[in-house]
Amino acid sequence: MHMSTLLVALCAAVIIWAFLVRHLTAKPWLSVSEPNNTGPVQIPALKLGLWAFFACITSLFALFITAYLMRMDPNHASDWYTISKPGILWLNTGLLVLSSLAMQWARHAERSENIQSVKTALAAGGLLTLAFLGGQLIAWQQLKNSSYFDIANPAVGFFYLLTAVHGLHLIGGMFVWSKTSFRTWRRTTVEKGRLSIELCTVYWHYLLLVWIILFGLLLST
Amino acid sequence: MAYVAIADRDHEHHLHDPQTFITKYIWCQDHKVIALQYGITAISVGVLAMILSAMMRLQLAFPEVFSFITPNNYYQFVTMHGMIMVIYLLTALFLGGFGNFLIPLMCGARDMVFPYVNMLSFWVYLVSVIILMASFFVPGGPTGAGWTLYPPQSILPGTPGTDWGILLMLISLAVFIVAFTMGGLNYVTTVLQARCRGMTLMRMPLSVWGIFVATILGLLAFPALLVSAVMMILDKTIGTSFFIPAVLSMGEPLDHLGGSPILFQHLFWFFGHPEVYIVALPAFGIISDLISTHARKNIFGYRMMVWAIVAIGALSFVVWAHHMYVSGMNPYFGFFFATTTLIIAIPTAIKVYNWVLTLWQGNIRFTVPMMFAIGFIFTFTHGGLTGLFLGNVTVDLPLSDTYFVVGHFHMVMGVSPVLAVFGAIYHWFPKISGRMFNETLGKWHFWLTFLGTYSIYLPMHYLGILGVPRRYYATGITDFIPESAQSLNVGITMAALLVAVVQIIFFVNIIWSLFNGKKAESNPWGATTLEWQTPDTPPKHGNWGPELPVVYRWAYDYSVPGQPQDFIPQTEPHHGHDSVDK
């Protein structure tokens, strides 16, 4: 039971508690005409939904990381050995950083109402992400062809597993990206796309953060 | 652009508007239709799992008689019964079924905030059920690894279903988790965002609180199952060594090295314990509402009930290893988890006291829903008390993997939540269908089910104390199990078969009443909550007509002194001093 698991559980508990503790002082059986602490959370529903999803996938990645740390504990396991990671991973990381920057540019452009820039930035973000995913596949291939490839070695297993899970989430994001891009390309004004571009960008930054943590973990073995 | 609450927006932004048969009843985004779809699917697989349990009981009572129940088949029945009941019936029914139906109606919303994703969640759930059912038809049959699916046995030869069954099970679970995540995001966001004007969190009925907190638990805990399922799929298919240590299988050493079966157990139970609270918390919430409505009394200690639901939810993440006391882990961990397990009993007990205190001097009407609710209190208390035995490490050591555990978890997961489901279905049947069910049949159903399930599970605890092990196809001749234990097994089986057959009364009642039941008024129980104040019964698409409701009071203004009626709906504005406080 690793610190990260306990931390996630604790964070969840604290968030729920902090959110609700102000409400527990309410006395709903009294006649109060306009109760305070009333209404809905003041952000768009899609944004709240995305943050709820972030809580869910944070739990997922934290658990994968916990499993990794437990399985790859150097104190116990004399049964695995370090592998050399394919060098292309560094390039891929750079591509992902650039794609996040491109999405941020898209967000900035739609705030300054520059529809042409939005379209370009979105396209760049998508293409860079596809390049990242392609690079990951090349990394998989490189590891498979290398002398380190032994599937029983958990370092190899986790390499494929963690990159696959991250990649799948990125592919899911690409579905939303393609819907957003399609809508943007058909528009001449920015108004309606604002929220979806913002949410896409946040999601991209989140997955970049996840990748940096996973990459760091993989590099450590 | 300033934020405008969903409840305050005009609806030129249309709710999806179904016109054709297909969009009204099949590919439908209306939460009520989706709720029924979830309910029917869940109950159907539940009936299948009940038939599997009947076969298990036949084998246990008459070990030599049924030649078609081989040891492999027995373990397959055990596994499929368990997995279907816990996940595909209870979780899907409480969250997908009741959650979908009740949350928008009790919160005063027209629908869930993401109706398309909501619809998808049902169809993906259905796909997961189909994948699971397919495992009955593949070579080797379904997995027989026990619902806990512990490696290495679950993926090594010797256990039934290691060819295809286990893979289909794991894939089905992964698909279910995707479906659940889609649904869960809906429930959480709708409760937080789409409540109508005046509906504060602390005015929500406890049914919504139970489902809401259970959904949060699910969003955080199901990933653990996904992690363990994916890793086990990889161990099985491509030969990784996440869970499989260096091991001999059928006399031959396998290629695996260094994997940790305990890692699986940690991951599984990190999911598995919150899972049982995902089932229990909606039941708690629903029972609170049933009791207060049918006893015409506000729930005792509403704030404590909310606190207890939240505290149980939070604590449920730190008790998981009480399922692992016999796994060989560090004894200090056992001490820690036993402590947290005893702590979680405190808010649970508070809830039981509050239910009883709600009934105390209440104007109790012995309607069918009330009977099921009282039955819940009995059976859940019973199961919770046996859980205290099992929560202590030294007492758990001899009781682990015996029928004592089976009796315990059936009481808290099998009997109590199912009584809550029945109570809820009877309670909301008039709202869903616009008709009343047959009261006499309902009472027969209750008494036979309640007494019948007690007859099944009470003796089972005794078998467990004797030491009769669980998951045994046949115990054979032993020194410590007397002949009379086998007679007890026969008695339990008779009761089980009787209870299974009695459920036909329920189905006959519901189906007959759907077509021939007396037409129900819109609020036959005199309940305060919003779903009973809809302009139409059953509620039409959009639920509320042109105007959303406005809420002025909490959900429990029953028997307020000095009022003409013994309940005040939540939508009733205040006129002078009419609160309970005065």
Image (tube, helix red, strand yellow):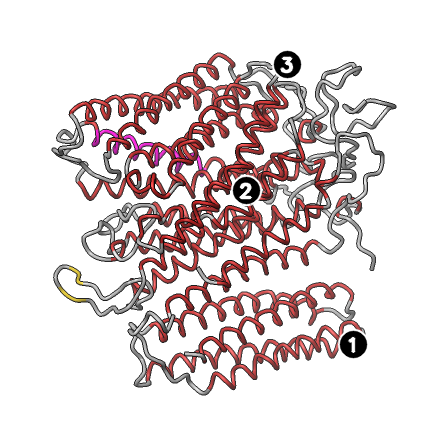
At x 23%, y 29%, the residue is B58
Judge the density around disc 1: few (<14), some (14-19), many (≥20) Cα neighbours within 10 Å: some
* Highlighted magenta segment, given as a residue range: B41-60
Q: Which mark is residue A114?
A: 1
Image marks 2 and 3: residues in contact by CB distance under 8 Å: no
Q: Tell which tag, 3 or 1, sits nearer the viewer.
A: 3
Which residue type does callout 1 highlight?
A: Asn
Residue B55 counted in the magenta span: yes
Q: Tell which tag, 2 or 3, sits nearer the viewer.
A: 2
| Count of marks, rendered view | 3
Q: Are marks 2 and 1 on the same chain?
A: no
At x 35%, y 35%, the residue is B48
Q: Farthest residue toward the right?
A: B576
At x 36%, y 43%, the residue is B393
Q: Quadrant of the C terminus of chain B?
A: top right
Which residue type does callout 2 highlight?
A: Ile
In this rendering, does residue B164 appear at all? yes
Classify residue B354 by image quadrant. top right
Q: Which mark is residue B312?
A: 2
Q: From the image, tell me which residue sits under label 3.
A: B363
Which residue type does callout 3 highlight?
A: Asn
**Chain at tag 1:** A
Q: Earlier in the sequence, mark 2 or mark 3?
A: 2
Q: Is residue A36 left or right of residue B166?
A: right
Measured from the top left, where is residue A105 in percent x and y? 71, 78
In this rendering, does residue B524 appear at all? no
Q: Is residue B492 left or right of residue B210?
A: left
